[in-house]
Image: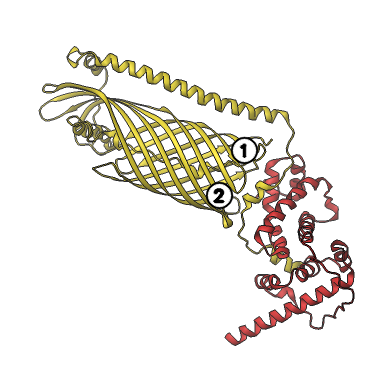
Amino acid sequence: MSELREKFDQLPQDFDRMAIWNGIEKPKRQMFPYRILWVLLLLIGFSGVFWGINQYNKSTLDKNKVFVEKAVPSFGQKSDSSRLSMDLPQLAPIEMDSNAALAMEGHIGLLENEFSLAYPKPKAVSPKEEASFIASNEFFNSQSQHVYIGSWNLNPGVDLSTAISSDFYVFESADPGPVLSLSKVGRNRLSIRAGLGRHQTTFVSAGEEDIRWREKLEEAQLDYSLGLRYEREFKHQLLFSLSTTYKLYKDNIQTSYLRETEEQKVLESYELYNHYHLFTAQVELGRRFYLKDFFWDVSAGLGLQLKQITETDFFVSEGELASEVQIGEIYTNSRDVYTSLQTAIGRQIGDRIFIRTGLQLNSGIDLSAKEAPLQHRMGAGNAFVEAGIRF
Amino acid sequence: MGKFVTDKELVIACLKCDPAAQWELYNKYVQAMYNTVYRYTCNHQDTQDILQNGFTRVFKHLKNYDESKGQLLSWIRKIHVRCALDFLKKRKSFFEEIEEGLALPDQNPTAWEELEAGYILKFIEELTPRDRVIFNMRQIEGYSHEEIAEMLAININSSRVYLARAKKMLREKISAYQARLSIVQ
């Protein structure tokens, strides 16, 4: 009898553990300090978002002021070139091995080559036009149904992600940032999510010219996102989702370098400040598999991404033959249609906290690009930790 | 391997409202409970609803669990069986009294343990709900007819009749299945 019962107990059944777990009323720990901690986390999250918005507005205003100041004098007034000339002797020249320094040279090479194309026709191609943004990994971001306020959750948390775009060797990194999400519990879930992160872009590509000296600054900038998402769970842990995200971020890259050609030595300074407004809409179908101690998510999606870029470039070239400056704002709109494949592994740590990390592959077509419309991207290390106290 | 080695540790941590322990207890027993409840309902959605109710009761009454009276698994199973029965009883005329029925002696006892659980479950699904419940309670959970009669509020004779009928039906199905298998082979 008990033997047969054991056999029955071990029969594999395909059911949604999380859906059942979410419907169970569990005794909660009535400990005041935990509530205080949770409220503190919330406050930190909210104040982080407001602080970030203020910082962003402030830095944007400051940057505009700088540009105005720089735009007034012409290159002949030596405002920047004199600074570069002063700095140059203080730095030891770098003897670069062609193999060992491929990535470092490549970085300069891309900027240099791309800019040389951009210079006569600024709208044709510039490095930041090709810099790609990995669509927010919404499927993975949404698993925050563990803190209840009635039938709603409110979670403070942290996001961490990195991404590589293969087409132009652009490496994008986003440092951890606070995330707040409010989501409805149940089989039909609706969630609103606000995030604050740090965005940094680094170019890595192959170059050709001999760089004798260089100095670069790629600053991590704050980014802001706001998302709305609808999810529906079906049997067999199938998950359908429809999500929209708005994200605002910017890049700040300054590079100065001395390159040597057969005929001359040219000292160049390149400064780039870009603002991005990104709107993404995505439909996804995924499934969660429960392993012994972990869960494994797989999903596939189709999305549309609209991006508006405001580029503000500043370029100085000083040499025997060339001496010019260009400054101005360029507006670019792009439309991408992309497919995505995502996989992630995670672990539920108790009722309220989980950790997860995964990989995301995107292939898309830039509908507005005349050159190289195909783009392939890979995002790695997406990890999310969310915590809270159930009310 | 979970954080809590023994059920005793797990229960103590759950009583302290440790969410990690609650999750571990749930995760440890949910599959067995799913299979148990499914044998009664043969419906996945109903099973999920009953499990939510069952585990809610488990957490609520965990302080009443007495280790000396049996394993935690058995205690949790009893709660879930009761939840399944409560759920089924809500359906009108689910259990009918059989006043005059005759419980036939088991002429050809079947060695149920030797059969594969997968296809026994398939045949159990084909039984009528009433026969299925009695068969599960008596033959698989091990309740006595007295206990069954008390839990279902029927008389003992009804319980015996339902069981005999269920066994007969199952034996016929299994024999037919085995005959088909031998023809194919």
What color is chain A drawn in? yellow
Label 2 element class: strand
Q: 10 Å neighbourhood of mark 2: few (<14), some, or many (≥20)?
A: some
Identity, as a three-letter code, of the amino acid under mark 1: Asn
Above or below, A52 against B32 in this view is above
**Image quadrant in which you'd find residue A216:** top left
**Residue name at image x 81 percent, y 73 percent:** B162
Q: Are marks 2 and 1 on the same chain?
A: yes
**Do the CB atoms of the residues marked 2 and 1 lie less than 8 Å apart?**
no
Determine the chain carrying the residue at label 1. Answer: A
For the residues labelled 2 and 1, the Cα–Cα distance comes to 16 Å
Q: 10 Å neighbourhood of mark 1: few (<14), some, or many (≥20)?
A: many
Question: In the rendered image, is residue A130 in sight?
Answer: yes
Determine the chain carrying the residue at label 2. Answer: A
Image location of residue B157, percent across then percent down: 89, 73
In front: B138, or A275?
A275
**Residue name at image x 69 percent, y 83 percent:** B175
B42 left or right, relative to A246: right
**Image quadrant in which you'd find residue A324:** top left
Identity, as a three-letter code, of the amino acid under mark 2: Arg
Image location of residue A284, percent across then percent down: 47, 49
Image location of residue A283, percent across then percent down: 46, 48
Image location of residue A77, percent across then percent down: 19, 12
Q: Which residue is mark 2?
A: A232
Q: Which residue is mark 1?
A: A153
**How does the figure colour the protein chain or chains?**
by chain
What color is chain B drawn in? red
- Disc 2 versus disc 1: nearer the observer: 2
Residue A242: numbered disc:
none
